[in-house]
Image (cartoon, rainbow, N blue to C red):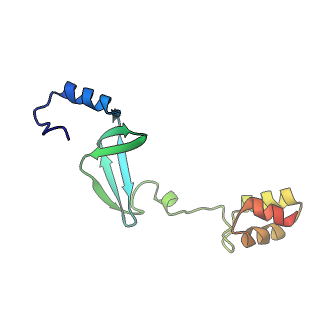
Amino acid sequence: MFGGGGGMNPRKMKQMMEQMGIDMEDIDAQEVIIRTPDEELVFDDAEVQLMEAQGQKTYQVVGEPESRELGSGEGSAAAEGDSDESDSSSGVDEDDVELVAMRAGVDEDTAREALEANDGDLADAVDELE
């Protein structure tokens, strides 16, 4: 596309990219984490560039990743969805139950049943009870 570009002047290359509507920007990233279904790839001190062309943003990450199994890194409890606020028997958040009960003017058991019937959707549960 740039005719080999191996010996091209960097200033000329930047000028050509600007003419084509391509913007490049270095990002001062401290850490980049890519999560896959099986692992996390963690890049410490990676070089990250943002390229924007025709409304599309593309990130380029350069560095050596460290591979971690999911759940072994920092914040793994959040990644696994651990929550103390959900009701263990129904999986419905207690705050949601209280909110639906208050808004619909019903007891918490009725609110919990409505939430379960509506897959945890607050608005649908309140609508059903009103």
- The residue positioned 85% from the left and 57% from the top of the image is 102
Percent position of residue 93, x then y: 69, 63
Q: Provide residue 56's location: percent of width, then percent of height.
A: 41, 43
* Corner quadrant of residue 112: bottom right
Quadrant (top left/top right/bottom left/bottom right) for the N terminus = top left
Considering every residue shown, the one lying at the far left of the view is 7
Q: Specify whether 117 is left or right of 78.
A: right
| Left or right, 50 with reference to 86 | left
- Residue extending furthest toward the bottom: 89
Above or below — where is 94 with respect to 12?
below
Q: Which residue is more in the foreground, 19 or 103? A: 19
Q: Is residue 115 above or below residue 45?
A: below
Residue 118, quarter of picture: bottom right
In front: 18, or 58? 18
For image coordinates 69% across by 73% down, the residue present is: 90
Q: Quadrant of residue 119?
A: bottom right
Tell whether 83 sits left or right of 89.
left
Of 68 and 22, the residue lying toward us: 22
In this rendering, position of residue 130 left or right of residue 63:
right
Query: How many marks are shown on the rendered structure?
Result: 0
Q: Residue at x 49, y 59 (%)?
A: 79
Q: Residue at x 78, y 72 (%)?
A: 113
Where does residue 27 sit, x and y in percent of width and height?
35, 35
Residue 4 is situated, as x and y percent measured from the top left of the image, at 12, 39
The quadrant of the picture occupied by the C terminus is bottom right
